[in-house]
Image: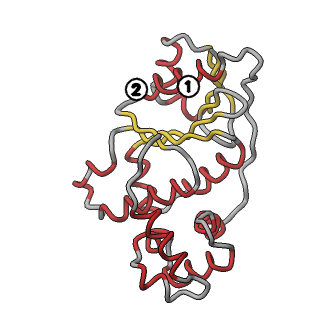
Amino acid sequence: MKIVIDHREIRSRVAESLVKLGANIEIATLEVGDYVVSDRVAFERKTVDDIFATLLERRELFSQLFDLSRSYRLPILIIEGGDPFFHSSRRVNPMAIQGFLNAIALMRIPTLYTLNEAETSQVISMIARKEQADKNRPVSFHGKRSRLSQSEVKEYIVSSLPGIGPVAAKNLLTHFGSVENIMTAPQEELMKVERVGSRIADRIREIAGGRYESK
């Protein structure tokens, strides 16, 4: 089992745990992703602290995830440290967290939750073993960081919604100011935006407010 790890991840204990699980690790400078286990599967790892820092300080997580989804056919986000909704003591509005996670879901990136570094390494190793069960599948890292601005990434996320093109996405962002506000807006407010009729407004509310059910 081979796993390519970004050199910045060596400071965590995930790499050490992967070695104990039998992984042959290769350290590299990855422009996209933190862990690569095949030519199509790569992971971005964020702790709950990272997620809250992103919410409060607006770091480049969405840009990182955009590059991950563009570079690998099966990108995966790992949020380590438990469910963000349980950390209410941080005084972050739960709706802000929900809007944030909805935006990630719109990018079609599966999100896995782990409690600690040991559990993260177990998840990565299990998926790596399954991927590499096919001896002909190479472990290769690729992808370059894009130069998209934060505004362009937000336009990409909103335009991923069914029935919404680039123009409607820009109109929605201009009206509401953020992806989070779009995802939490009532249907009546959505319909005030040019090129957003009742059908599209219904679809946005269905995606944003509907319960997720894994297959």
Position in image of residue 210 (x %, y %): 40, 60
Give how far apart the Cα atoms at labels 2 and 1 are.
13 Å
Residue located 30% across and 51% down the image: 85
In the rendered image, the vertical position of residue 168 relative to residue 136, given as above or below: below
Task: Give coordinates of residue 114: x percent, y percent.
Answer: 39, 34
**Which sits earlier in the primary sequence, circle 2 or circle 1?**
2
Q: Quadrant of residue 95?
A: bottom left
Which three-letter amino acid code belongs to the residue tagged 1? Ile
Image side of residue 137 versus residue 86, left or right: right
What amino acid does circle 2 point to? Glu
User: What residue lies at 46% left-to-right and 59% top-to-bottom?
Assistant: 102
The answer to whether residue 161 is above or below residue 70 is: below
Q: Quadrant of the N terminus?
A: top right
What residue is shown with label 2? 119
* 187 up-or-down from 80: above or below: below
Q: Going 64% across and 33% down the picture, which residue do you hit?
A: 41
Q: Position of residue 98 (x, y in %)?
A: 38, 59
Looking at the picture, how far across and down is residue 202, in whole percent? 47, 73
Mark 2 and mark 1 residues within 8 Å of each other at the beta carbon: no
What residue occupies the far front of the structure in this picture? 199
Q: Check disc 1 and report the residue beneath it.
A: 127
Decide: few, some or many residues near mark 1? Use Cα within 10 Å; few <14, some 14-19, many ≥20: some
Which residue is at 38% across, 55% downward? 211
Q: Helix or strand or loop: what does disc 2 sit on?
A: helix
Q: How many marks?
A: 2
Disc 1 is placed on an element classified as helix
